[in-house]
Structures are given as structure tokens and as C-alpha cells.
Amino acid sequence: LGISLAALLGNGLIITSTACGQHLHTPMYFLLNLSLLDLGCISTTVPKSMANSLWDTRDIYFTRCAAQVFFILFLFTAEFALLTIMSYDRYVAICKPLHYGTLLGSRACVHMAAAAWGTGFLTALLHTANTFSLSLCRGNAVEQFFCEILKVLKLSCSRCYLSEVGLLVVSACLSFGCFVFIVGSYVQIFRAVLRIPSEQGSLKAFSTCLPHLAVVSLFITTCIFAYLKLPSIFSSSLDLVVSELYAAVPPVVNPLIYSLRNQVLKDALRKLMTGCVSAAIHCLLSSAKGSQCRS
């Protein structure tokens, strides 16, 4: 519940401030998409787990399990693709600032964001259709707090599951390629930052970029560990911890790392909160005088 509320508050503030501030639409376009994906990620897994805990049940319908697998893959793949695009965005902004308007104009940003969402949808469709077309005959217990694709594959008694394992390996290789691209982008950024004569400017750039790289590293390493770990180190408690790290932590941390450290966005949030407080005070004063409030 605490994780869900923190993710809802942080991402909700970013979405609201970006939607209300016309001047934030273009520079905060990728952050808006990231917040939407984070809200989707946390809403797909945690609420069902909380409901099961409250009602003391572990049941989930087959169709809902398939839908949960689809949305998890869709949202997480789209988010990782978007994080890759955002690393390129920061590389161009810092290393090639004079070409930023040409390489990353409004149309290019829309196309890249659409590509991230489309990649997530296509990946999720392929994996979900392939997984749930198999016959599941080894019980019905998914050893996880949400329907994870590997846990569902363990219930299959068909040899056709090797095609899905092959798809997972290909997806893992592509994800690792994106991770290498992200690391390469930040290496170029750090090299450019080290050339900045101002020590304060270098520290500010490092304090912004290093947390970005840390969050991405946490996301990709835990995902790879969860899907490619050796059977000898299997542990249900370890699986739960790892799945929490890549499924629940990033949606909470991303608003702090990517958005709320941005001065422009903080100014917009301050303006939004000031406006809300002023409107509430005006409403209370109007109510005291007997007039009606208008939203």
C-alpha cells in the first residue's frame, strides 16, 4: 500500500503538472510517458496482491492471469525502450546541444515514444499468445505475487515451450543491447561533463546522470537475474525480493530521479500547489460568506 501510494503521488503530480502547464508539453514529453508507464506497471501487479492479502485468497482467473502477463510485458518493455530513448535524448542535449532541435524535434519525439509503446505491445502480444497457447497440466500454483511468464511456463508439460524460451532469450539479448547503448550514452555524457571548466556544473551533471544510470542498472540486472538465473540458486524468497526490485521499486524511484530533481518541473509543481491552496482558501472564504464555490 505504501509503495502504491508513493508511486501514485509522485507520478500523479508529474502527469498533472505537465498536463496543466502548456510550456512543459515539449521538454517533458518523455517524462510524461514514463510516468504513465510507471503508473501502469504498479497498477498491474500490486493492487491484486493487496486484494489477495486482504481477502486471504490466492486465486486469480486464467483470463486475468493472461491479461496480467500481457500488461506486465507491454508496460515494462515500453518503459525500458523509453529509458533507452531518454539516454539518447540526454546524450544529444549535453554532447550535441546545437543539433538538439534538428535531431529531437517535436515530431521525432512523438515518433520515438510511439515506437517505444509499439515495441512493448508487439513483444507482449507475441509472448502472451505463445505462452498461453501451451497446455498447462502441472498444477495451477504460480509461485509469485503476480503472474510471471517463467512461473507460468513451469506449469506446461508441452515441449513447445522451448519456442517461448527462445523468445525470452532473444528479448534478454535485445534488452542487454539496449543496456549497453544506455551505458555508452552515459559514458559519452561523462566525458563531455569532465570537460566542463566549472566544477559546480560538473557536479550537477554527475549528480543528475549517476542516479539515472543506477536506476536503469537496477532494473535490467534484476530482470536478467530473474529470467536467466541458474536453477541451483533457486529460492522462493529470493524470487520475491528480485521481483519486487524490478516490478515495484522503479515506479516509485523514477519520479524522484528523473523528474522531481528537474528545476523547471519543480517550479511548475510549486505553481500548481500554490494555485490549489489559493483556490481552496478562496472557496472557504466564499462558503463563509454564503456564496457558492466554482471549480
Image (cartoon, grey):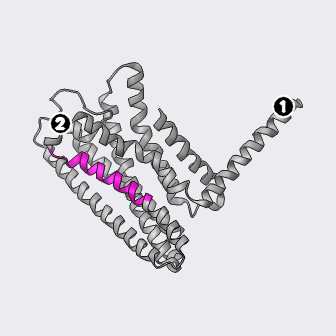
Which residue lies under the disc numbered 2?
154
Tell me where residue 194 sits by quadrant: bottom left
Disc 2 marks a residue whose amino acid type is Lys
The 10 Å Cα crowd at callout 2, few under 14, some 14 to 19, many 20 or more, is some
Residues rendered magenta in the picture: 211-230
> Cα distance, mark 1 to mark 2?
62 Å
Q: Is residue 263 left or right of residue 184?
A: right
Query: Which residue in the rendered view is the most extreme toward the right?
Result: 289
Tell me where residue 216 sits by quadrant: bottom left
Q: Residue at x 32, y 61 (%)?
A: 179
Please say if the residues under marks 1 and 2 sit with CB atoms less than 8 Å apart: no
Disc 1 marks a residue whose amino acid type is Ser
Marked residue nearer the N-terminal end (1 or 2): 2
Query: Which residue in the rendered view is the most extreme toward the top?
Result: 56
Query: Which residue in the rendered view is the most extreme toward the left?
Result: 159
Q: Residue at x 50, y 56 (%)?
A: 258
Q: Magenta stretch containing residue 221, yes or no?
A: yes
Tell me where residue 278 sits by quadrant: top right
